[in-house]
Amino acid sequence: MRLESGLVDRARAGDLAAFEALVSPLIEPASQLARAILRDWHEAEDAVQEATFKAWRAVGKVRSDTTSLRPWYLTIVANEARSRRRGRWWNIVRLAEPRGDSEGPNPEQHASQSVDLERAMRRLTDRERLILFMHFYLDLPLDEIGGVLGLSTQGVKSRMYRATRSMRPALRCQEEV
C-alpha cells in the first residue's frame, strides 16, 4: 500500500479517520500474523487490538519518507504477539491453518497432505515457521518480512531456503509411500 503524504500527515497530526484509513486494510493480515505467532484466535485479536492502540500512540514517529505503513505496523503486531507469548506460563502447540480452496485433492488426500505439512512444519523453529507463514500465506515480500523480523532481505532468503530444504525430506518420504 502506497501512503499518501497528506493522509500520513493528517494521521501524524492526530486525525483518527486518517489513521483508520491507513490501518484498516492491514487488520486482517495483522490478525493472521498474530494468530501464527500465538496459535490462538482470541489471544491474537487482543494482541492486534493492543498493537493498533500502540501504533496510534506512535504514529507521530513515522518517518516522513516512509513509503509503506505495512512493515511498521506488522512489526508492532509481531512484537506485541511475541511479548504475549513470552508472558504466558503455558504453551499449546498449534499451527496456523492455511485457507484452502474448495477445488483440488479429495478430502482424504487433503487431510493426509495437511497432516504431512503440519508434521514437517513442527520440525522448524518458530522464526522459520513465521518466515514461511508471512511469505507464503500473507504474501509479504522478503524486504517487508525482514523489516518485521529485524533481518536483512538476504537473511530472510537464506532462512527461508534452509527451512524449505529441511522440510523436503519429511514431505518426500510421504510421497514415496
Image: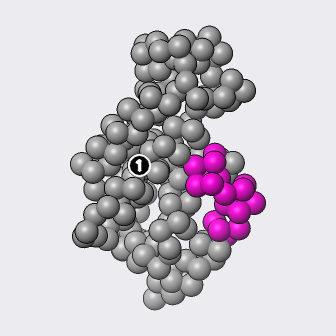
| Mark 1 element type | helix
Q: Is 157 colored magenta in this rendering? A: yes
Q: Which quarter of the figure has residue 112? A: bottom left
161 on left or right of 139:
right
- Tell me the residue at 47%/79% (across/down): 123
The segment highlighted magenta reads 144-161
- Tell me the residue at 47%/83% (across/down): 174
The percent position of residue 97, horizontal first and vertical second, equals: 36, 58
Which residue is nearer to you in this view: 108 or 85? 85
- Tell me the residue at 55%/19% (across/down): 12
Q: Is residue 15 above or below residue 146?
A: above
The percent position of residue 61, horizontal first and vertical second, equals: 58, 29
Which residue is nearer to you in this view: 122 or 115? 122
Residue assigned mark 1: 80
Q: Is residue 9 above or below residue 148?
A: above
Q: What type is the residue that disc 1 sits on?
A: Glu
